[in-house]
Image (tube, rainbow, N blue to C red):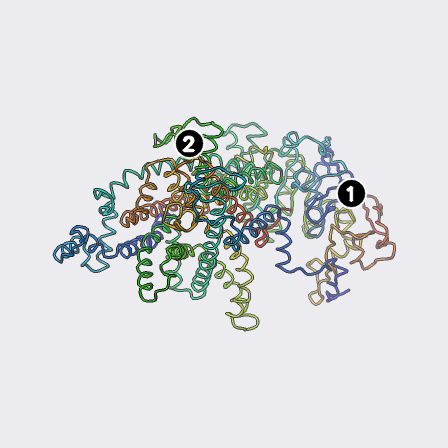
């Protein structure tokens, strides 16, 4: 044997003749082994289903007040009891879940879109635009999240109200008079406006690091368009981080919605929000703890489920080097 | 006065990982007497570093010594309680690590790290330890040691840092010194200095030295004896001259052929050993080198060869040795 | 080291600009035509042109935007945020903040102490006994407690500890200083949120540090496990934890809003809640600006601490 030939690396010699594994299959397998993550996933799917079909499965009309049965504890007829206006708490909690999920979905997706676009754009374009984008993102991230959200909510609500009023006057569509819808709108906009910065910075960082690598390699090798290569390699790498971020963002978005509603500036009655229910229940926490406990524990449980899912996804999609 | 510093008999070390069990060291035996310089050579992953860590009982959590004896200065340390083993590290056995930058705490002054074993084992006060540390730095050839004591690892050059590592290893006058690839990360000229330093210290202190490396050139420079390892096993061992002039095992021959020497004819390509090291989790039966061996016969694939003494002091494990 | 400090301070300037700028713009936009609103109020909805003009001059609404922004910033630096036109008696916002902020800061510091005193040792323990039931239970319990929102945790804590288990006899409202008994429960509830991050990052960081070669080298010198942890592991593991602590301040301030409300503590959070609910934009703007500045200041402190912990940072 005088030289190294191709046959030196045949599978028999190397013992590496294994089947190739895809990135996603690997990730799915890792995730399925994570017990907490799987449990969280089950709960999350369950919650999403509830959110979807809530209006059709609630035993009572969530706004219906039964003055005979005010402030009752959990019973056979009212699984979670009733509130101070005689409304069935279970129905309200289910509708509250629906609210939370709806807000979380829209906010998560819109912040993801804004964040990815701005982050990628800033990284790819570079120069002054990038610098200013970084300033804006870092600046936004310096605000305590809830303060800024609340601030924006309080500021934009009157404007949106006025806008809706004008639209109602010109189109006579009841849609614009519905305060609940307007509440939603306000919350969506404010949370989206405030929250994209975290993902934006993440995406920018990823794009920058990939750009460094691929750009240089591409210039030397094929001479293919660096943009094309960047995009081809960008997506699989960044997508993992984006998905993990979005799953944790989902839980936070629900948290934010309930927080704003707790403060009275988010979704307000007659809309159903777990946050508002908790606030309302606080007044009588000694005598009727179920008014706080039921929506509170439900909210906590849902957020917990999404946290576990997010953790599981993180382990699956961003594997760290295992300790040998 | 020659004492038997280290005697290893049939050491077996395994790693228990997610993917399976790795037989990192399978039946290794060797002896080191004071004043000896013994080299352990082999490719990456052949088990030489694991063997060294086993001697010091510094294996990571997945590693376990499952058999054999390690007798250090007359004491079997395989089943020694952790606290007692700890007391041996420094005064009896010490290690020089390969990557001097990684082996020093980046947030602690070099002097403080050097003084640690002095304060722990020799029970020196801080002031005394400081004096001793300066002496040690002098001995390993570091200029202006008083100032260097207060410097941080990243402020040293590679060669200087390696000297510091040597100083730390020597601080409690160990009987056995293990050097794990001490020169791999250094320039050739610095390599020579470090090797000379080690020889000088060997003469002064009379310690036994185990030198672990994949570089046969280094081995031929300073080692009296050499042990060649492959796939966790010893395949050949003996006096350095004997083994290198007349290698019996095909692997040893391959290693020597693939290394560059001064008289090498530039028109000839270097002969690499074909193939890659075996997967230690799924070892085929028989000799682990069989898939890559130029002298392989049928028996090699079926039966593991045993170590046979070829000449006095020179043994090899092969069914088809070079004669 | 000095150069490092100066560099960090300079980097803060554009961020400060963004923060004050966005607060200012939002405040201006949200206030709408404040002069108009005030005029209407003063004249019982009978619009009076003279009164309106007077209002406009008083509120400097006739000046160009940049000049108003400059005035806003210079006033803010002096702690002058104007008065609240919504609350009874048009109280001076600056004074409201200066009275309530110290309470919030004390509460926040209490929470940070708890987070550090509990979180870091728990993280180290979880790492030292990793993949055992100790590890799983620590991480599990902390995850659960931490994921519960503060405005859920606090009332539930009250319900469970006071009403059901009767561990704590009564709930005293108000604030009696940083080290009083009353401070414990609110601070603990506040500390739960960031606790998970600290525990997790400490754990990951310690695991990472433990796998470093210099830890093995330290053991090779004869150091005991305890010595290794105390002398080498902790200092080297702190950098990611510091990062998490930096982010924590923002979370603490947000959580403070709820904790103060539930426990009746008159901190800046309570002031803000009142402002949120009554649409008092001036006060909202002022409190937002103050808290954002606090977050920035704490980030600066964290950056400086990096320099203290890791000599490689400050000597380059």
Left or right of B158, for residue B3:
right
Q: Which of A140 and C261 is in front in this view?
A: C261
Q: Total label count? A: 2
Query: What residue is pinned by disc 2?
Result: C184
- What residue occupies the far right of the structure in this picture? B299
SS under mark 1: strand
Whether residue A271 sits left or right of residue B75 in the image: it is left
Q: Do we see residue B82 in this rendering?
A: yes
Occupied quadrant, residue B14: top right
Q: Are marks 2 and 1 in contact (CB under 8 Å)?
A: no
* Chain of the residue where label 2 is placed in the rendered structure: C
- Circles 2 and 1 on the same chain: no
Q: Mark 1 lies on which chain?
A: B
Q: Judging from the image, what secondary structure is the residue with disc 2 in?
A: helix
Near-viewer residue (A128 or B127): A128
Which label sits on residue B27? 1
Say whether residue B262 is left or right of residue A316: right
Q: Where is residue C241 in the image (x, y as percent from the top left)?
A: 48, 43
Residue nearest the observer in this picture, C50 or C140: C50
State the residue at coordinates (67%, 34%).
B175
């Amino acid at each position: 044997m005088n030289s190294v030939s191709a046959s030196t690396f045949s599978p028999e010699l190397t013992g590496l003749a294994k089947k190739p594994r895809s990135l996603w299959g690997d990730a799915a397998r890792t995730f399925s082994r994570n017990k907490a993550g799987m449990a969280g996933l089950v709960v999350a799917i369950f919650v999403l289903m509830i959110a979807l079909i809530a209006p059709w499965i609630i035993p009572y009309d969530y706004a219906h007040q039964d003055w005979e049965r005010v402030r009752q504890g959990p019973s056979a007829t009212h699984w979670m009891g009733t509130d101070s206006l005689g409304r069935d708490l279970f129905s309200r909690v289910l509708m509250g879940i629906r609210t939370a999920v709806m807000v979380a979905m829209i906010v998560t997706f819109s912040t993801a879109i804004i964040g990815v676009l701005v982050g990628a754009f800033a990284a790819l374009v570079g120069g002054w635009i990038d610098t200013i984008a970084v300033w804006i993102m870092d600046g936004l991230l310096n605000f305590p999240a809830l303060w800024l959200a609340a601030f924006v909510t309080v500021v934009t609500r009157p404007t949106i109200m006025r806008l809706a009023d004008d639209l109602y006057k010109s189109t006579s569509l009841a849609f614009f008079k519905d305060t609940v819808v307007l509440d939603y709108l306000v919350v969506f906009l404010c949370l989206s406006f405030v929250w994209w910065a975290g993902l934006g910075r993440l995406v920018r960082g990823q794009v920058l690091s990939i750009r460094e690598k691929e750009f240089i390699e591409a210039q030397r090798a094929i001479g293919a368009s660096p943009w094309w290569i960047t995009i081809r390699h960008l997506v699989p790498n960044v997508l993992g981080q984006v998905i993990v971020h979005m799953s944790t963002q989902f839980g936070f978005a629900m948290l934010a919605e309930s927080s704003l509603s707790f403060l009275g500036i988010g979704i307000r009655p007659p809309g159903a929000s777990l946050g508002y229910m908790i606030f309302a229940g606080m007044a009588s926490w000694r005598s009727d703890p179920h008014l706080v406990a039921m929506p509170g524990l439900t909210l906590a449980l849902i957020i917990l489920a999404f946290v576990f899912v997010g953790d599981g996804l993180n382990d699956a999609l961003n594997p760290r080097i295992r300790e040998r | 006065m020659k004492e038997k510093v280290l005697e290893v008999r049939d050491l077996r070390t395994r790693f228990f990982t997610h993917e399976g069990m790795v037989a990192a060291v399978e039946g290794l035996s060797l002896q080191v007497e004071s004043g000896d310089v013994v080299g352990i050579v082999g490719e990456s992953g052949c088990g030489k570093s694991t063997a060294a860590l086993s001697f010091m009982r510094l294996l990571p959590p997945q590693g376990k010594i499952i058999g054999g004896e390690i007798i250090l200065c007359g004491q079997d340390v395989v089943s020694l309680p952790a606290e007692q083993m700890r007391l041996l590290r420094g005064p009896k056995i010490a290690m020089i690590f390969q990557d001097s930058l990684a082996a020093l705490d980046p947030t602690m002054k070099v002097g403080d790290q050097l003084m640690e074993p002095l304060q722990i084992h020799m029970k020196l006060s801080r002031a005394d330890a400081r004096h001793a540390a300066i002496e040690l730095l002098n001995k390993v050839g570091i200029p202006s040691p008083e100032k260097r004591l207060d410097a941080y690892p990243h402020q040293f050059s590679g060669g200087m840092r390696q000297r510091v590592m040597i100083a730390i290893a020597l601080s409690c006058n160990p009987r056995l010194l293990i050097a794990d690839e001490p020169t791999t990360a250094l320039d050739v000229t610095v390599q020579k200095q470090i090797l000379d330093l080690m020889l000088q210290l060997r003469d002064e202190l009379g310690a036994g030295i185990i030198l672990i490396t994949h570089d046969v050139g280094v081995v031929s420079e300073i080692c009296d004896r050499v042990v060649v390892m492959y796939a966790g096993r010893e395949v050949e061992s003996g006096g350095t001259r004997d083994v290198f002039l007349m290698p019996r095992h095909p692997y040893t021959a391959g290693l020597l052929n693939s290394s560059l020497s001064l008289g090498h004819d530039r028109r000839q390509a270097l002969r690499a050993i074909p193939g890659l090291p075996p997967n230690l989790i799924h070892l085929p039966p028989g000799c682990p080198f069989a898939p890559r061996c130029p002298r392989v016969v049928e028996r090699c694939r079926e039966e593991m060869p045993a170590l046979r003494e070829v000449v006095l002091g020179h043994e090899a494990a092969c069914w088809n040795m070079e004669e | 080291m000095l150069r490092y400090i100066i560099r960090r301070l300079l980097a803060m300037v554009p961020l400060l600009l963004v923060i004050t700028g966005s607060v200012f713009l939002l405040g201006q936009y949200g206030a709408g035509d404040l002069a108009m609103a005030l005029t209407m109020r003063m004249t019982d909805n009978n619009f009076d042109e003279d009164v309106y003009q007077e209002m406009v001059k008083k509120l400097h609404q006739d000046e160009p935007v940049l000049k108003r922004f400059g005035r806003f910033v210079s006033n803010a630096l002096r702690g002058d945020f104007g008065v609240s036109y919504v609350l009874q008696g048009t109280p001076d916002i600056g004074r409201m903040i200066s009275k309530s902020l110290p309470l919030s800061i004390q509460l926040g510091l209490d929470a940070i102490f708890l987070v550090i005193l509990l979180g870091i040792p728990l993280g180290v323990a979880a790492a030292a006994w990793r993949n055992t039931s100790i590890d799983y239970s620590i991480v599990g319990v902390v995850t659960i407690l931490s994921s519960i929102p503060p405005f859920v945790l606090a009332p539930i804590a009250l319900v469970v500890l006071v009403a059901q288990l009767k561990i704590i006899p009564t709930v005293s409202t108000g604030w009696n200083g940083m080290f009083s008994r009353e401070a414990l429960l609110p601070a603990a509830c506040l500390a739960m949120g960031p606790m998970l991050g600290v525990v997790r990052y400490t754990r990951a960081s310690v695991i990472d540090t433990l796998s470093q070669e210099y830890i093995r080298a330290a053991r090779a010198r004869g150091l005991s496990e305890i010595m290794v942890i105390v002398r080498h592991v902790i200092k080297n593991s702190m950098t990611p934890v510091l990062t998490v602590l930096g982010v924590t301040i923002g979370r603490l301030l947000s959580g403070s809003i709820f904790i103060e409300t539930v426990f009746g503590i008159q901190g800046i959070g309570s002031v803000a809640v009142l402002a949120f609910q009554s649409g008092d934009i001036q006060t909202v703007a002022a409190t937002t600006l103050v808290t954002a500045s606090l977050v920035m200041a704490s980030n600066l402190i964290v950056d400086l601490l990096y320099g203290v912990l890791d000599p490689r940072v400050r000597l380059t």
